Amino acid sequence: MNTSISINGADAVDCASLGWSFETRSLRNCAPDVATLRRVREAGEAIDIAPDSKVVLFVDGVRTFTGTAQPAQFSIAENGERVTVQIFGPWWHLMAVTFCRADFHDEGGIYNQLPPIEGDTFVVGSGSGEGTQIWDGSGWVSGGAGTTYKWARVQNLSATPPEVDIAFFTGARGLLFDPNWPLFPDVYRSVYDEVSELLTYMLEVHTRLGLEAPFQVDLGQLETDLGAVATPRFRTFLDQKVATVLTTMLAIKPDASVFFDYSTEIPTLRIRVASIETTVDLAKGVAPLQRITATPRPDLQPAGIIVRWEYDEDLPYSWRGYRRPRFLDKFPLDVLPHEPWVLTHTIDAVAGIGSFQPQLAESIYNSIGILRVTGSMSLTFDNPAEAAAIRPGLCYRLAGDAALDDAQLLTQDSTWNLTTGQVDASLGYPRALALDDISALRGWVTWTVQGVFASTTTIIPPTP
């Protein structure tokens, strides 16, 4: 197996010729992928890999990893000095950027609008005729309608045109909604709609700043991979990084996994759900399975999902739960709310709900309907390409084992040791969901929506 490396766009050369060894590569769901390089030559003989360098790694001529170098780690033990450099994949960039929008309107209106950059100009609209007021350090200065401001890092109102601190009009509140929302009272959006808008924002910010995009997205493929479970179409994320927002959006799909395809020149972000993956059978004592530790989680397997949609303008809010529901959505159809392990949710439906037919219960049940296990396993491959293909989201089944025959072994993280050919994988649900018991499932179907004027907790509505 031959490994080669490209640093900051240079031609790829053999790793050993630069004094480095490609040791391991870890792919993780909703966390930065990491490749580890170990220095195999003495200081001065090995080329330095500076922090923030763009590093591309190849195995047998196939692009296997692309990421950003971190500062070198040093350790000294009885067997000598060890120097390693970790290369972080594109999820690291998602953790670095805050999801924010800009509010340029003097009346407080909010736009899905990218933050300005230094050198841009902004002309105050007519609005109410009062113009935009700027705080000059001691009081409010009104520029009047039609005034032109120039964005700057430090505010200077004596300049021509006046320079306004960019941070003054740029907030860390990201609002996701259909721009035509005042005209249509529908409250539904798909997870795909939200995720695609978020990722497009992330990439457009890099373009606007003149930075190289850390990844690319095939929106058509993303829609196929992700599906179209519905969410509230009007949601606000405040003071959160893009990575956190993306993880929150995907909570409605607990069987979804985010991974990057490193075979493309620019890594391609992909999201797959277990329901569209092909399950691979493994057998005890038969390659590639070398070791497995698995604990079934029947405590995370609900017997049914019931959603009661209440709405009545004549009865007070305090009667919630006692009113006859306008719609009853449940799966399976024969479950009752007082039976063991049945999750029941009662919500106050919005006006006009009669035009929608709830279909959420079956969708939620199916996403958690296969008994999953937590644990780990080790797979060994002679072919590097087979080892490199093990990623988050892959589904396995231990065939012929009565205890785990119906269980889904859902891969979350995988670490490939290039020296031994062994891949160690963790199994279970995404760590971000923090599922300790069945009561935690309730968080999958509710959102706390932070609006401009208030906050409310509501259930994720079904597809219209």
Image (cartoon, rainbow, N blue to C red):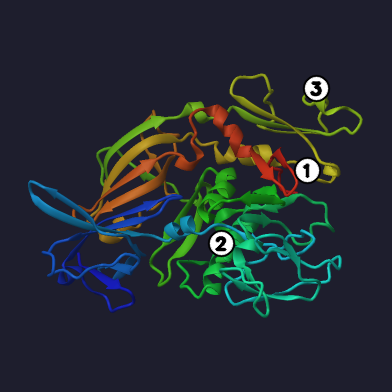
Label 1 residue SS: loop
Tell me the residue that label 3 is attached to: 322
Residue 148 in view here = yes
Residue type (three-letter) at the residue carrying disc 2: Leu
Closer to us: mark 1 or mark 3?
3
Percent of width and height locating residue 301:
53, 30
Q: Relative to 150, is 26 above or below?
A: above
Closer to us: mark 1 or mark 2?
2
Between discs 1 and 2, the one toward the N terminus: 2
Cα–Cα gap, marks 1 and 2: 30 Å
Q: Residue at x 29, y 67 (%)?
A: 57
Question: In the shown orientation, is residue 164 left or right of residue 26?
Answer: right
Residue 357, numbered label: 1
Cα–Cα gap, marks 3 and 2: 42 Å
Residue type (three-letter) at the residue carrying disc 3: Tyr
Residue 199, numbered label: 2
Cα–Cα gap, marks 1 and 3: 21 Å
